[in-house]
Image (cartoon, rainbow, N blue to C red):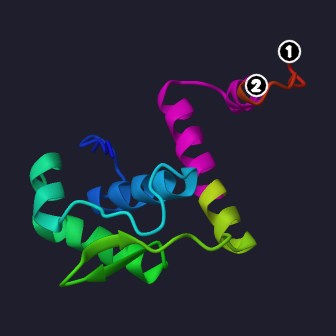
Amino acid sequence: MELTIDTGSPVPVYEQIRVQVTEVVESGTLRVGMSLPSVRQLAADLQVAPGTVARAYRELEAEGVVVCSRWTGTRVAGVAPMARSIRRRRLDQAASRMVASGRRLGARDEEIAAAISRVLGRPSQGQ
């Protein structure tokens, strides 16, 4: 499992870890019952504080993505089909990040919408 941290991102490090682990589990790369690195090991690998990884693991456990045990470590619990409201919230967050990145580049909203359309493989209104 390869996780990366963007120290320049406004997204907190624990949230970057949570999102990436969730994506790896949802993609099937990590299957139910597979072990995740220990808090200390992942913290060392990412060069972050153990408390940061512990918080990410707590959030993942609260969402039902992992199960944490003192005896067996942190394992993939499996991901139930995502509730529509959670999926919508995450999509809105991802779109907000994309729009903010585009605006930092100096792009107009129409250019950002056209970029999204190109990625989706659909012609945009302004092309």
Task: Please provide the residue range marked out in magenta.
Answer: 92-118
Q: Compared to 91, does 66 lie above or below?
A: below
Front one among 44 and 35: 35
Magenta region, main secondary structure: helix
Residue located 76% across and 25% down the image: 114
Q: Amino acid at mark 1?
A: Gln
- Of callouts 1 and 2, the N-terminal one: 2
Q: Quadrant of residue 70?
A: bottom left
Q: Which residue is mark 1?
A: 127
Residue located 64% across and 71% down the image: 86
Residue located 29% across and 42% down the image: 4
Instruction: Determine the residue located farthest toward the top in the rendered image.
Output: 127
Q: Compared to 115, does 25 lie above or below?
A: below
Q: Which residue is mark 2?
A: 114
In magenta segment, residue 107: yes
Q: Compared to 63, does 12 lie above or below?
A: above
Front one among 78 and 126: 78
Location of residue 84 in the rendering, given as x and y in whole percent from the top left corner: 74, 70
Left or right relative to 65: residue 80: right
Left or right relative to 98: residue 122: right
Residue located 20% across and 66% down the image: 52
Q: Compared to 24, does 31 lie above or below?
A: below
In magenta segment, residue 122: no
Front one among 71 and 51: 71
Element under label 2?
A: helix
Q: Which image quarter holds the C terminus?
A: top right
Marks 1 & 2, CB-CB < 8 Å contact: yes
Location of residue 98 in the rendering, given as x and y in whole percent from the top left corner: 57, 39
Q: Amino acid at mark 2?
A: Ala
Real-space Cα separation, disc 1 to disc 2, in angstroms: 7 Å
Location of residue 57 in the rendering, given as x and y in whole percent from the top left corner: 31, 72
